[in-house]
Image (cartoon, helix red, strand yellow):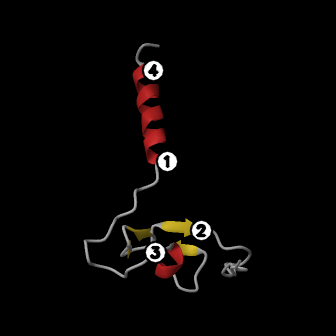
Amino acid sequence: MRRLFPFAAAAFVALVASGCPRSPDAPEPGMGTPCEQLDDCNPGVTCGALRLCVAGFCEAEASLIRPCPGAGDPIVDPGP
């Protein structure tokens, strides 16, 4: 029983740590496309793999995944 506890604790920590999302990677200062919001980095795209706006610049690679409805059709923003 004493040998089971360390194994169970290690398995629990590994499970919890693997579920943590990665943090967004900010581009180098002055590099990347300038942005103010998510739409600036993903013009016309509202689902699928999206790039985040971090520290005023778009990420180099997509890090946000938003599911598309149905057969992968983009979500149309109805606007204000």
Which of discs 2 and 1 lies nearer the camera? The answer is 2
Mark 2 residue element? strand
Task: Find residue 70 and report its horizontal and vertical position in percent.
Answer: 74, 75
CA neighbours of label 2 inside 10 A, class few (<14), some (14 to 19), many (20+): few
The three-letter code of the residue at mark 2 reads: Arg
- Residue at horizontal 43%, vertical 34%? 13
The residue at which mark 2 appears reads as 66
The residue at which mark 4 appears reads as 4
The residue at which mark 1 appears reads as 19
Work out whether residue 19 or residue 34 is closer to the camera in this orientation and state it: 34
Task: Find residue 51 and report its horizontal and vertical position in percent.
Answer: 46, 73
Position above or below: 80 against 44: above
The three-letter code of the residue at mark 1 reads: Gly
The extreme left residue here reads 29
CA neighbours of label 3 inside 10 A, class few (<14), some (14 to 19), many (20+): few
Work out whether residue 26 or residue 15 is closer to the camera in this orientation and state it: 26
Distance from Cα at disc 2 to Cα at disc 3: 19 Å
The residue at which mark 3 appears reads as 36
- Residue at horizontal 45%, vertical 47%? 18
Counting residues from the start of the chain, the first of labels 2 and 1 encountered is 1
The three-letter code of the residue at mark 4 reads: Leu
